[in-house]
Image: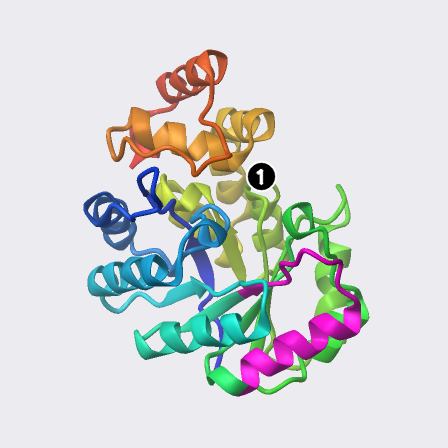
């Protein structure tokens, strides 16, 4: 068991105000990722609004993605408040052919390191689905300690981690430290798109990308250049994306990518309430950003 490497593209999950997934719009978005030959497709991540969808709607989204992704591995978000619910979601994903489950430490009551260890161990054991740790403290308010990551890397069935960006200038050190502490073959990847080119240049296994879910071609090219050791080309492509990174930082990648998808004509869906779509200023910033990019970037 191992995690797919390279670019893991995470699209939005278009849905209506009642939380019903728009399968036609999701299909249009998935088709772009397949055409770009991304390394894997990540459905129901944070950008994919997994915590805002019912179990039935999650199933519908996974089935639709699996029907279109062909040989491209599917990584499915399986986070839930309760351990038994996360197990059910992991078993659903496995039954539908997912390559791995992306599990976060979501909670209402703050969780201890030991509670999260038991939660992840139980899901991995009961589901039989390869599990990737999703460390997303900005959303869950839980941070995986280095010791916890090392312990979980030795649990059968837990095969990788999606890290948040480390502090500026510490990417290579963070990657090396985590690599030395975790079990052999444990996959190490990063989110936070603007830091991920340097992560891939430093030797990370996977770039978990919001932008890859809407602009897959340039993200695939950047990831492949970095993995091939061509840091000059990877950084050149990264520099071309500077206007996107600025918009992501200013407006949040989730809200920005919904507006990008709307202006590109891929969907009219809005983020789930209580999250509001961007206002007039944000919409103008997105329009200006799209006009500033070379046409081949937006594919």
Q: Tell me the residue at 55%/81% (across/down).
A: 124
| Extent of the magenta region | 103-125
How many marks overall? 1
Is 150 left, or right, of 38 in this rendering? right
For this rendering, which residue is in front, 137 or 5? 137
At horizontal 47% and vertical 82% (from top left) the residue drawn is: 127
Residue at which label 1 appears: 194
Q: Is residue 251 above or below residue 219?
A: above
* 12 drawn magenta: no
Q: Can you give x and y, in whole percent of width and height, for residue 258 in the image?
A: 40, 33
From this viewpoint, is residue 194 visible?
yes
Please determine whether, in this image, residue 66 is positioned above or below residue 167: below
Residue 29 in which image quadrant:
top left
Rendered location of residue 143, percent (x, y): 74, 57
Q: Which quadrant does the C terminus fall into?
A: top left
Tag 1 secondary structure? helix
| Mark 1 Cα shell of 10 Å, populated few (<14), some (14-19), many (≥20) | many
Tell me residue 128's x, y (percent).
Answer: 47, 85
Q: Nearer the viewer, residue 271 or 97?
A: 271
Q: Is residue 178 left or right of residue 255?
A: right
In the rendered image, residue 7, in percent from the top left (x then y), is placed at: 44, 55
- Residue at point 59% right, 87% down? 156
Specify the quadrant of the image occupied by residue 212: top left
Left or right: 181 in relation to 67: right
Above or below residue 283? Residue 190 is below
Q: Is 74 positioned to the left or the right of 147 in the image?
A: left
């Amino acid at each position: 068991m191992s995690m797919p490497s390279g670019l893991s593209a995470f699209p939005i999950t278009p849905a209506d105000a009642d939380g019903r997934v728009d399968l036609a719009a999701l299909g249009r978005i998935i088709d772009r990722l397949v055409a770009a030959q991304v390394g894997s497709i990540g459905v129901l991540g944070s950008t994919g609004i997994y915590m805002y969808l019912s179990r039935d709607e999650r199933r519908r989204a996974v089935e639709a993605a699996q029907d279109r992704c062909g040989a491209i591995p599917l990584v499915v978000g399986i986070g839930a408040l309760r351990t038994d619910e996360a197990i059910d979601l992991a078993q659903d994903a496995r039954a539908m052919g997912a390559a791995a489950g992306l599990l976060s430490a979501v909670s209402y009551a703050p969780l201890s390191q030991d509670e999260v260890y038991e939660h992840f161990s139980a899901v991995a054991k009961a589901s039989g689905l390869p599990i990737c740790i999703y460390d997303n403290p900005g959303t869950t308010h839980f941070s995986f300690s280095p010791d916890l990551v090392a312990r979980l890397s030795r649990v059968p069935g837990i095969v990788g981690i999606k890290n948040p960006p480390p502090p500026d200038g510490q990417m290579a050190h963070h990657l090396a430290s985590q690599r030395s502490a975790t079990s052999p073959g444990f996959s190490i990847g990063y989110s936070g798109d603007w830091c991920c080119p340097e992560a891939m240049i430093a030797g990370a296994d996977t770039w978990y990308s919001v932008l890859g879910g809407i602009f897959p071609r340039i993200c695939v090219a950047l990831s492949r250049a970095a993995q091939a050791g061509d840091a000059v080309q990877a950084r050149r492509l990264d520099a071309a994306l500077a206007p996107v990174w600025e918009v992501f930082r200013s407006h949040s990648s989730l809200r920005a990518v919904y507006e990008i998808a709307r202006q590109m004509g891929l969907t009219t869906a809005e983020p789930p309430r209580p999250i509001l779509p961007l206002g007039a200023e944000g919409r103008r910033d997105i329009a200006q950003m799209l006009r500033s990019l070379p046409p081949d970037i937006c594919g």
